[in-house]
């Protein structure tokens, strides 16, 4: 088996891969970048968009584009325009939490998990999470 690097993104913390079966592309994020990536294996082209704040996770929308989490909650993202639209911040009144991971369910719901941030980790204060408690939120709709 041959293994080949197809994108040398030099991501600080690459996570959240999502395969788009319609567009036949791979989406993923660099949490601390903060950058969203889309790799097209047919053309071998990689596109990227800089997010305005640290990312948590991404999911596909039935109507196109992405649903994602950032430090300030849920957002829609339209790759064609690069526009981020805030939806909700369910934990805005609870300090020291961040969105950690999320996935689309077959029903289309986007489930995400929250964890508590740790502090004092060499240059990663309020950026690196240590799982301490988990709750899931459901973003219904498209």
Image: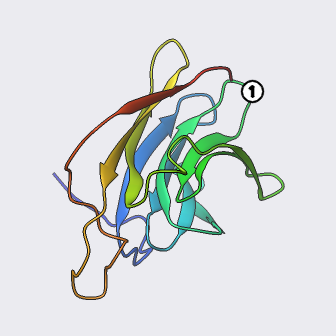
The 10 Å Cα crowd at callout 1, few under 14, some 14 to 19, many 20 or more, is few
- Which corner quadrant of the image does residue 133 belong to? top left
The type of colouring in the image is rainbow
- x and y, in percent, of residue 62 in the image: 67, 24
- x and y, in percent, of residue 75 in the image: 66, 46
> Residue, x 30% and y 62% (percent of image)?
117
Seen in the picture, residue 91 relative to 47 is either above or below; the reply is: above
The extreme top residue here reads 107
Query: Seen in the image, is 23 located left or right of residue 92?
Result: right
> Residue, x 54% and y 40% (percent of image)?
90
**Closest to the observer: 125 or 37?**
125
Query: Seen in the image, is 33 located left or right of residue 12?
Result: right
- Residue 44 visible, this angle: no
- x and y, in percent, of residue 63 in the image: 74, 26
Seen in the picture, residue 13 relative to 112 is either above or below; the reply is: below
The extreme bottom residue here reads 123
- Residue 5 visible, this angle: yes
Q: Quadrant of the C terminus?
A: top right
Seen in the picture, residue 6 relative to 83 is either above or below; the reply is: below
In the rendered picture of this protein, how many numbered marks are placed on residues?
A: 1
The extreme front residue here reads 93
Q: Secondary structure at mark 1?
A: loop
- x and y, in percent, of residue 125 in the image: 32, 79
> Residue, x 52% and y 59% (percent of image)?
71
Seen in the picture, residue 110 relative to 79 is either above or below; the reply is: above
> Residue, x 56% and y 60% (percent of image)?
36
**Closest to the observer: 16 or 24?**
16
**Closest to the observer: 32 or 36?**
32
Query: Seen in the image, is 6 located left or right of residue 26?
Result: left
Q: Which residue is mark 1?
A: 63
């Amino acid at each position: 088996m041959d293994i080949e690097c197809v994108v040398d993104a030099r991501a600080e913390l690459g996570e959240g891969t999502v395969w788009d079966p319609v567009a036949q592309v791979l989406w993923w994020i660099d949490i601390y970048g903060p950058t969203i990536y889309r790799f097209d294996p047919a053309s071998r082209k990689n596109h990227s968009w800089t997010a305005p704040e640290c990312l948590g996770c991404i999911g596909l929308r039935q109507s196109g584009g992405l649903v994602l989490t950032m430090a300030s909650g849920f957002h829609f993202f339209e790759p064609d325009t690069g526009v981020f639209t805030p939806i909700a911040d369910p934990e805005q009144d609870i300090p020291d939490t961040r969105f950690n991971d999320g996935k689309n369910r077959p029903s289309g719901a986007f489930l995400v998990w929250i964890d508590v941030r740790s502090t004092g980790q060499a240059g990663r204060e309020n950026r690196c999470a240590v799982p301490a408690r988990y709750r899931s939120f459901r973003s219904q709709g498209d």
